């Protein structure tokens, strides 16, 4: 199949009921999604460090108290 035939067949499917045009995203929208995903990923980069620090701090505070007073002391 030549490149022209592939393009023609692709256009046919876009126009048919098999592939509604709403399922075909324009390149600009795809680029926006990729950009948003990239920004979200950058936002989360520091989150694991913060979460790990918080969990370590809780473990250092809560576990010794539980070990000393027992679970029943906290209801």
Image (cartoon, rainbow, N blue to C red):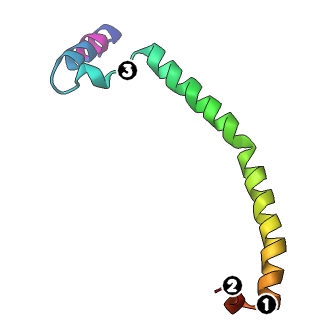
Position in image of residue 31 (x %, y %): 52, 19
Disc 3 or disc 1, which is closer to the eye? 1
| Residue that carries the numbered disc 3 in the rendered image | 25
Horizontally, residue 74 falls left or right of residue 34, namely: right
The span from disc 3 to disc 2 (Cα, nearest Å) is 55 Å
The span from disc 1 to disc 2 (Cα, nearest Å) is 9 Å
Kind of element beneath mark 1: helix
Quadrant housing residue 10: top left
**Mark 1 in CB contact with mark 2 (< 8 angstroms):** yes
**Mark 3 in CB contact with mark 2 (< 8 angstroms):** no
Q: Which residues are magenta?
A: 5-9
First along the sequence among labels 1 and 2:
1
| Residue that carries the numbered disc 2 in the rendered image | 74
| Circle 3 crowding by C-alpha within 10 Å: few under 14, some 14–19, many from 20 | few
Quadrant housing residue 37: top right
Residue 11 lies, with reference to residue 66, above or below; the image says: above
First along the sequence among labels 3 and 2:
3
Residue 57 lies, with reference to residue 19, above or below; the image says: below
Magenta residue check for 6: yes
- Residue drawn at (75%, 64%), measured in percent from left and top? 55
Residue 59 lies, with reference to residue 29, above or below; the image says: below
Kind of element beneath mark 2: helix
Disc 3 or disc 2, which is closer to the eye? 2
Magenta residue check for 44: no
Quarter placement of the C terminus: bottom right
| Residue that carries the numbered disc 1 in the rendered image | 69
């Amino acid at each position: 199949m030549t490149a022209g035939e592939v393009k023609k067949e692709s256009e046919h499917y876009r126009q048919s009921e098999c592939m509604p045009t709403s399922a075909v995203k324009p390149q600009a929208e795809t680029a926006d999604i990729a950009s948003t995903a990239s920004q979200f990923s950058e936002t989360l980069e520091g989150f694991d460090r913060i979460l790990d620090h918080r969990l370590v701090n809780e473990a250092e505070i809560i576990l010794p108290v539980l070990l000393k007073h027992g679970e029943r002391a906290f209801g």
